[in-house]
Image (cartoon, rainbow, N blue to C red):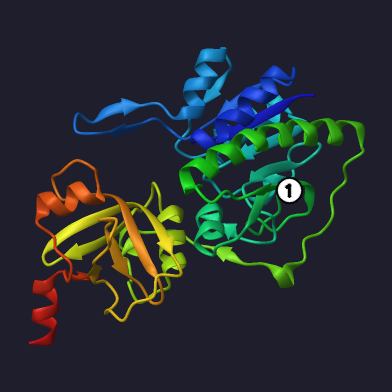
């Protein structure tokens, strides 16, 4: 079978690697152009690009995918199947109809749930117990095509978006290989999605990580896990921005404190009042400091019971009130 693979980030790497290991190496790999990153603005290859180079695969990185040159190349190649995983481009009709078996995509959710850009984050944020992967046939509408294969995966209590994404990537690679074999044999044909059940996971920005201590403790923990590593969560101690890296919800901790208040604890834990319950701050990071555990943070910043953590800087609050 003649395959073209398109993907960009780490999530797409296992699928490419497992295709090659199964004897289904693509005739061509497409990935986003290498970008300048970091303080030195060094040109950095994409994860998929690095693997393709290591495996000696033909690699294309056009700025525009569906221009005359690239479409001419793809028509000449005449692939049986185009496989994508987090490629980052929307396909037009002429590309969708080019391969004999169509274009398929690996998506880390149980479609039709969480179509869009942040499905893993959304599953964690909403406190779901189960998520999974879906391989579907691509159509004009985003993540709306017929489902070819789907596999569930339990969400663990200690999962973050980063850890869950990479586990789904590994499992998704095997699902892609299974799907290719099924398409080749004709044993997989697909079934339409129930569009009435569809939900959407939009693009995140850094400000989405602002913690609201008026939320239940478990909701705050879910948010911290969901937004790790991006966009991260944060709060303020007076005018100091504090990144909240890891927490544990203490749902049954009864109190009458204002949400966001640091409370006394017999175990010297950094417990912050939520509504209801409390949140143990396991790992935090102040501006221009290294990550540290809660006790070290309290000692270094001279934080005492009664201190309030807020959603905005104190100076901003005063300005708003004035």
Check disc 1 and report the residue beneath it: 136
Q: Position of residue 43 (x, y in %)?
A: 31, 26
Residue shown at 39% from the left, 30% from the top: 34
Q: Is residue 26 visible?
A: no
Front in this rendered view, residue 37 or 60: 37
Query: Could you tell me which quadrant the C terminus lies in?
Result: bottom left
Q: Position of residue 127 (x, y in %)?
A: 55, 62
User: Around disc 1, counting alpha carbons within 10 Å, would you say few (fewer than 14), some (14 to 19), or many (20 or more)?
Assistant: many
**Residue 172, placed above or below residue 122:** above
Front in this rendered view, residue 294 or 75: 294
Residue shown at 79% from the left, 33% from the top: 178
Residue shown at 67% from the left, 43% from the top: 105
Front in this rendered view, residue 111 or 233: 233
**Residue 86, placed above or below residue 109:** above
SS of the residue under disc 1 = strand
Q: Position of residue 108 (x, y in %)?
A: 61, 48
């Amino acid at each position: 079978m003649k395959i073209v693979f398109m993907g960009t980030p780490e999530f797409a790497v296992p699928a490419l690697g497992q295709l090659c290991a199964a004897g289904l190496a693509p005739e061509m790999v497409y990935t986003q152009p290498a970008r300048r990153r970091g303080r030195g603005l060094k040109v950095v290859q994409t994860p998929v690009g690095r693997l393709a180079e290591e495996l000696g695969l033909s690699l294309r990185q056009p700025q525009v995918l569906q221009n005359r040159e690239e479409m001419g190349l793809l028509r000449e190649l005449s692939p049986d199947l185009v496989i994508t995983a987090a490629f980052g481009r929307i396909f037009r009709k002429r590309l969708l109809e080019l391969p004999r078996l169509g274009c398929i995509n690996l998506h880390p959710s149980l479609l039709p749930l969480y179509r869009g850009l942040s499905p893993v984050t959304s599953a964690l944020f909403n406190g779901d117990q189960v998520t999974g992967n879906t391989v579907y046939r691509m159509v004009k509408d985003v993540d709306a095509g017929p489902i070819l294969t789907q596999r569930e995966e339990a969400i663990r209590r200690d999962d973050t978006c980063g850890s869950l994404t990479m586990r789904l990537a590994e499992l998704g690679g095997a699902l892609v290989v299974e799907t290719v074999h099924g398409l080749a044999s004709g044993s997989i044909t697909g079934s339409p999605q129930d569009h009435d059940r569809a939900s959407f996971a939009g693009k995140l920005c850094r400000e989405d990580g602002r913690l609201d201590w008026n939320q239940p403790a478990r909701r705050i923990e879910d948010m911290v896990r969901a937004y790790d590593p991006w966009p991260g969560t944060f709060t303020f101690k007076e005018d100091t921005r504090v990144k909240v890296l890891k927490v544990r919800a203490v749902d049954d901790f009864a109190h009458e404190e204002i949400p966001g208040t640091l409370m006394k604890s017999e175990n010297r834990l950094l417990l912050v009042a939520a509504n209801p319950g409390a949140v143990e701050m396991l790992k935090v990071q102040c501006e221009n400091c290294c990550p540290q555990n809660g006790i070290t943070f309290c000692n270094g910043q001279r934080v005492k019971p009664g201190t309030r953590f807020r959603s905005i800087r104190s100076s901003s609050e005063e300005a708003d009130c004035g």
